Image (cartoon, grey):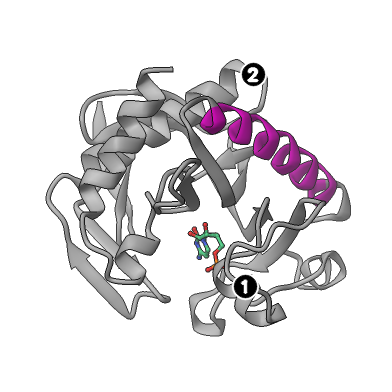
């Protein structure tokens, strides 16, 4: 049973439940970008991101990758394991796009022969800066052992998700993964969401973007693109 609100973010609410180790995630019809500078209300956004994230996190669970996701409750909500947030973001890149491409002066979509894994400090005031493991440990954000687990999970999840999206004719260009410590065991598990809000997803045939870049770059048709991602995943 849903109890008190324990967190309200831009795009989500988190509620307590009768079980101290479980929470309910509620997905709102709000989209934000560029460190919350750009924001919009988009009808249906919460429903489609809830469904896509439930699909992807459920798939990772089934593959033996630990995530906070337990089950989807309804159109907008999912039951999740309670975590202590680790304020770090692991971003893996199959291609260089967005911030990384701009920073390194390569064309947007440059495909290197390797996969790149970055670590960022999840801190809005600082603009989520890139950090290395030594800096993350120095700030007591995580231990070296925890970081090793996070990188290992992120790489395995990245490979699994890339293969899954490929079956849907979609290229996973990059993705951000967040982690937490499960409140019941301290286990490091994937938290938050994985969706077109947190990944770049390009059509394999046409290169068309099906992700939050449609919002960032004012390309329009955001919700139809998200719905198409869901349809293609569900038809695998
Ligand atoms: O913004 P940037 O180009 O670094 O984003 C890399 C990937 O991480 C993109 O898929 C983006 O949507 C995601 N990301 C995110 N949340 C952030 C920063 C990036 O989901 N705070």
Image height of 1 relative to 214, above or below: above
Residue 90 is situated, as x and y percent measured from the top left of the image, at 67, 55
Image height of 88 relative to 23, above or below: below
Mark 1 or mark 2: which comes first in sequence?
Answer: 2
- Answer whether residue 163 is magenta in the image: yes
**Near-viewer residue (71 or 59):** 59
Q: Secondary structure at mark 1?
A: loop
Residue 26 is situated, as x and y percent measured from the top left of the image, at 27, 42
Left or right: where does residue 90 sit relative to residue 211? right
- Tell me the quarter of the image containing the N terminus: top left
Q: Secondary structure at mark 2?
A: loop
**Prevailing secondary structure class for the magenta stretch in the rendered image:** helix
Left or right: where does residue 140 sit relative to residue 87? right
- Answer whether residue 19 is magenta in the image: no
Magenta-drawn segment: 146-166
Question: Does the rendering let one see residue 184?
Answer: no
Q: Quadrant of residue 221?
A: bottom left
| Neighbour tally class for label 2: few under 14, some 14-19, many 20 plus, Cα within 10 Å | few
Q: From the viewer's perspective, is the residue at label 1 or at label 2 nearer?
A: 1
Residue 56 is situated, as x and y percent measured from the top left of the image, at 48, 30
| Neighbour tally class for label 1: few under 14, some 14-19, many 20 plus, Cα within 10 Å | few
Find the residue positioned furthest to the left. 43
Q: Quadrant of residue 88?
A: bottom right
Residue drawn at x 66%, y 63% is 110
Left or right: where does residue 20 sit relative to residue 104? left
Mark 1, residue position: 107
Mark 2, residue position: 63
């Amino acid at each position: 049973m849903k109890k008190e609100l324990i967190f309200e973010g831009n795009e989500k609410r988190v509620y307590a439940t009768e079980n101290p180790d479980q929470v309910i995630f509620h997905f709102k019809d709000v989209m934000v970008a560029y460190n919350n500078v750009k924001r919009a209300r988009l009808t249906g956004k919460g429903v489609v991101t809830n469904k896509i994230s439930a699909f992807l996190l459920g798939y990772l669970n089934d593959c033996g990758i630990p995530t906070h996701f337990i089950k989807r409750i309804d159109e907008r909500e999912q039951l999740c394991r309670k975590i202590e947030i680790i304020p770090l973001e692991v971003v893996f890149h199959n291609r260089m796009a967005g911030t990384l491409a701009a920073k390194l002066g390569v064309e947007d979509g440059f495909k290197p022969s390797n996969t790149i894994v970055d670590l960022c400090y999840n801190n809005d005031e600082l603009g989520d800066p890139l950090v290395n493991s030594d800096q993350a440990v120095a700030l007591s954000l995580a231990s070296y052992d925890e970081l090793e687990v996070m990188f290992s999970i992120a790489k395995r999840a990245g490979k699994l998700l890339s293969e899954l999206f490929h079956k849907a004719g979609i290229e996973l260009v990059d993705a951000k993964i967040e982690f937490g410590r499960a409140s019941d065991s301290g286990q490091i598990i994937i938290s938050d969401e994985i969706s077109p809000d947190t990944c770049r997803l390009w059509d394999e045939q046409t290169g068309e973007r099906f992700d939050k870049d449609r919002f960032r770059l004012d390309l329009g048709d955001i919700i139809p693109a998200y719905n198409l991602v869901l349809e293609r995943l569900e038809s695998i």
